[in-house]
Amino acid sequence: MNLEEKQISSNTLFEGSFLNIHQDQILLPNGNQTQRVVVRHSGATCVLAVTDDERVVLVRQWRYAAGRALLEVPAGKLDAGEDPAECALRELAEETPYVAERVEYILKFYTAPGFCDEVIHLYRAVNIRPNSTLSPDQDEFVETVLLNREQARAAVENGEICDGKTLIALQYWFNE
Amino acid sequence: MNLEEKQISSNTLFEGSFLNIHQDQILLPNGNQTQRVVVRHSGATCVLAVTDDERVVLVRQWRYAAGRALLEVPAGKLDAGEDPAECALRELAEETPYVAERVEYILKFYTAPGFCDEVIHLYRAVNIRPNSTLSPDQDEFVETVLLNREQARAAVENGEICDGKTLIALQYWFNE
């Protein structure tokens, strides 16, 4: 079956530093036309970092869109042209009191492909150690939370952890 | 630590049928101000449906934002006031040649809380059977794909399955 939808025209609703929003007129496979709102995102990485004593490094931060604080794996948007692995190392160092020797690629995924092209690249941090030169962004408010496997499983089951990328990263860890 | 960010003002950039986009001026915990673009979404459900012969029911559809077809669990946006469980039953029936006797709640999660309030509710379909009265939306183009556990694991590992909600649903299935 031909599934492809083709752009006819595009109207920019918003241009920001990491998000652009368009309303496109498109052609459906059956020849009909419709409109789609598309959020164009610069992409992001997240990182599964586990300490020597088998505790996962999570961050609690306010999520304005959700109207609440969420408990998540360290993550952040890609800078222009940035390698996703470098971004993973950078975000771990910026958001937590840990740094990693290196990261290994696990997988990547679309977060909300119904309306957004954001791809998150998930990495596994290797050989993490405390970071003695922490210098957080003064406008970033992030708490570090360490959970062992049992605590992390409980937090998924009771809904305390309810962020998609974090569920994917933790399920990967649980199955290692 | 006080993490809360408070709205000072809100400017509507776009109002659509299931997406509203705002640019808000907000107050950070340290008293500084900044702006946030927020995508307000009506929410969605997705459904893990497995046949009697242990194959998961997936759908392949064009994702305009991603510029490609993706392989996903059946899913869809909540209608206004719709119960998420009813939505899961409806989407399974609309998008695939299967219906379920009922669904059981697994968990819910934010897809992209950095800029969007979308919550997806994940359900497990119970007692699915072929649907003899399929009447798909004429502007919806969806192929059904059935994969056993081994095939689904391979599709995750080789990147053919790269949708966040589908990874969460499949990892749940793999661990059942």
Image (tube, coloured by chain):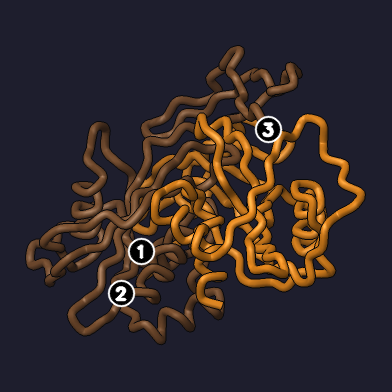
Chain colours: A orange, B brown
Residue A150 percent across, percent down from the top left: 49, 63
Q: Which residue is mark 2?
A: B56
Q: Is residue B117 above or below residue B21?
A: below
Q: Element type at marker 2?
A: strand
Q: Which residue is mark 1?
A: B73
Whether residues under marks 3 and 2 lie with C-beta atoms below 8 angstroms apart, the answer is: no
Whether residues under marks 2 and 1 lie with C-beta atoms below 8 angstroms apart, the answer is: yes
Q: Element type at marker 1?
A: loop
Three-letter residue code for mark 3: Glu
| Direction right: furthest residue | A133
For image coordinates 40% across by 70% down, the residue present is B170
For image coordinates 43% across by 50% down, the residue present is A27
Q: Quadrant of the C terminus of chain B?
A: bottom left
Q: What is the distance, in whole Å, between disc 3 and disc 1 at their CAs?
A: 32 Å
- Graded by Cα atoms within 10 Å as few (under 14), some (14 to 19) or many (20 or more), the crowding at tag 3 reads few
Please say whether residue A19 is visible from this viewpoint. Answer: yes
Q: Element type at marker 3?
A: strand
Judge depth for marks 3 and 2 and give the one in front. Answer: 2
Q: What is the distance, in whole Å, between disc 3 and disc 2 at their CAs?
A: 40 Å
| Tag 2 and tag 1 share a subunit | yes
**In this view of the protein, which residue sits in the foreground, A121 or A135?**
A135
**In this view of the protein, which residue sits in the foreground, B133 or B120?**
B120
Judge depth for marks 3 and 1 and give the one in front. Answer: 1
Return the chain for callout 1. Answer: B
Residue B71 percent across, percent down from the top left: 42, 68
Three-letter residue code for mark 2: Val
Three-letter residue code for mark 1: Val
For image coordinates 21% across by 76% down, the residue present is B51
Q: Quadrant of the N terminus of chain B?
A: top right
Q: What is the distance, in whole Å, between disc 2 and disc 1 at their CAs?
A: 8 Å
Q: Which residue is mark 3?
A: A15
Left or right placement of residue B120 versus residue B23 in this view = left
